[in-house]
Image (spheres, rainbow, N blue to C red):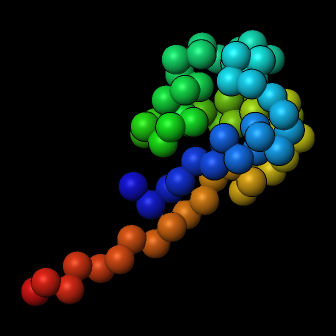
Amino acid sequence: MPIIVNLDVMMAKRKISLSELSERVGITLANLSILKNNKAKAIRFSTLEEICKVLDCQPSDILEYVKEEENNNG
């Protein structure tokens, strides 16, 4: 998937644990872990907004688009 979640980077910069972020955002630890580990298929804007509020960052600090390389095998 070409969207990369850099949540762990922002969490480290803000010195906040997964459990603290989970509590402050109001999302389960399991769902936040799925997001952090790039296993999520989607995120609600309301959840993204809360994460950005808590981490004092922009969505672009958390989400990154990485272009997939084209298959040149024919």
Q: Is residue 67 left or right of residue 72?
A: right
Q: Position of residue 18 (x, y in %)?
A: 68, 24
Residue 46 lies in what quarter of the image?
A: top right
| Image quadrant in which the C terminus is located | bottom left
Q: Is residue 2 left or right of residue 52?
A: left
Q: Is residue 69 left or right of residue 24?
A: left
| Above or below 2: residue 18 | above
Q: Position of residue 50 (x, y in %)?
A: 77, 29
Observer-nearest of 73 and 16: 16
Say if residue 50 shows up in the picture. Answer: no
| Image quadrant in which the N terminus is located | bottom left
Residue 43 lies in what quarter of the image?
A: top right
Say if residue 29 shows up in the picture. Answer: yes
| Above or below 23: residue 65 | below
Residue at coordinates 53% horizontally, 22% vertically from top-left?
A: 31
Q: Residue furthest toward the left?
A: 74
Residue at coordinates 63% horizontally, 49% vertically from top-left?
A: 6
Observer-nearest of 39 and 9: 9
Q: Is residue 42 left or right of residue 6?
A: left
Q: Residue furthest toward the right?
A: 56
Q: How many marks?
A: 0
Residue at coordinates 50% horizontally, 37% vertically from top-left?
A: 37
Residue at coordinates 75% horizontally, 13% vertically from top-left?
A: 23
Q: Position of residue 9 (x, y in %)?
A: 71, 47
| Above or below 16: residue 37 | below
Q: Position of residue 58 (x, y in %)?
A: 80, 50
